[in-house]
Image (cartoon, rainbow, N blue to C red):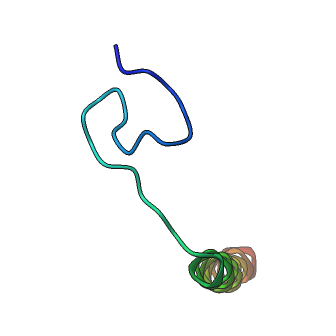
Amino acid sequence: MAENNKNSKIKSSGELPYEIPVEGSLGLLALGAAGIMEWRKVRNAKMRENKAK
């Protein structure tokens, strides 16, 4: 089993870990929020459409 320490670059599964910089993590957060907003918009439109029937 691989030893877990801060200097280790290899996980126990043998794959390299993802290193995302702070700017990248903020971008991923914003992209996720935009996706959720669009999903809610579509979901609410479908719900309104079903209520009208």
The residue at the point 75 percent across, 75 percent down is 51
Label count reads 0
- In the rendered image, which quarter is residue 1 located in? top left
Place of residue 37 in the rendered image (x, y in percent of width and height, measured from the top left): 71, 83
Residue positioned most to the left: 14
The residue at the point 27 percent across, 42 percent down is 15
Q: Nearer the viewer, residue 51 or 45?
A: 45
Place of residue 9 in the rendered image (x, y in percent of width and height, measured from the top left): 38, 45
- Where is 51 relative to 1, above or below? below
Q: Nearer the viewer, residue 23 or 33?
A: 23
Q: From the image, which quarter does the C terminus lie in?
A: bottom right
Place of residue 13 in the rendered image (x, y in percent of width and height, measured from the top left): 29, 29
Place of residue 45 in the rendered image (x, y in percent of width and height, measured from the top left): 68, 85
The residue at the point 36 percent across, 21 percent down is 2
- In the rendered image, which quarter is residue 26 located in? bottom right
Residue positioned most to the top: 1
Left or right of residue 43: residue 21: left
- In the rendered image, which quarter is residue 29 located in? bottom right
Q: Nearer the viewer, residue 11 or 37?
A: 11
Left or right of residue 52: residue 10: left
